[in-house]
Amino acid sequence: MQLFKDVNYTAPLVIPSVGIELRTKIYVQVIAANLTSQYHVLLDRCYASLSALPSNSTFFNLFVPCSKDLFTTMLENGNSQKARFSFPAFRFTEQQNQTISTYFLHCITRLCETSTCAQFKQCRRKRRDIQTTTITDGLSDTTLITSGPIRTRADTPPTTNEGAKSSAQKDSGNGASVGLGIALAALVVVGTIAALMAVSFYRKLRMLR
């Protein structure tokens, strides 16, 4: 199993220790090596769990036979020697209070003969009617493939309009206070000058008398 960050499956997805952003598109590829052209890869089910050993762990189904999560996109399955799908990075609610959500991806994988793959992909065919004990039946037994840890970091809360508005109002209020202080200082200076002029004029008037 390989994880990529582009739809062309050319750039491997490198997950940093701080995690990838929420809703980052993850492209998954399961490929069979050293396989004859007689067989194709068929994913039976893929799901994420909190543990690398999913037996007793919380899990989330990305897709199961005949059904898939709304945000999972199946690109190729049972048509060649590789299977591909994509999904957006998410977080488990059990880890909502943690800075980083860590989980593992698991895919239950089979090999099907090229001539019979189509019938095993049909939803109306009951799984219990399919004999999978040997490869000669057209479908192999299942193999569980697990990815390395996928780490998703929490969203950084954006600045709200209310917060921005409050900040703007605060700045506006500070500006108004400064302006008012300057106006009062100017008024005091003008008043002082007017008082001095009045005293000088009064003294001159007394001298003339």
Image (cartoon, rainbow, N blue to C red):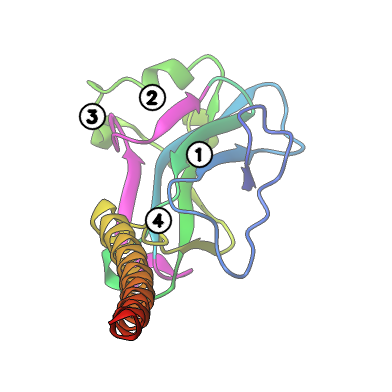
The question of residue 53 being in magenta is answered with yes
Query: Can the viewer see residue 160 in this picture?
Result: yes
Q: Position of residue 76 (x, y in %)?
A: 52, 24
Q: Nearer the viewer, residue 4 or 59?
A: 4
Q: Secondary structure at mark 4?
A: strand
Q: Secondary structure at mark 3?
A: loop
Residue type (three-letter) at the residue carrying disc 2? Phe
Q: How far separated are the C-alphas under marks 1 and 2? A: 11 Å
Classify residue 165 as left or right of residue 49.
Answer: left
Q: Position of residue 151 (x, y in %)?
A: 51, 63
The C terminus, quarter of image = bottom left
Marked residue nearer the N-terminal end (3 or 4): 4
How would you rate the neighbour count of disc 1 (Cα within 10 Å): few for under 14, some for 14-19, many for 20 or more? many
Classify residue 26 as left or right of residue 38.
Answer: left
Mark identifier at residue 126 = 3
Marked residue nearer the N-terminal end (3 or 1): 1
Mark identifier at residue 48 = 4
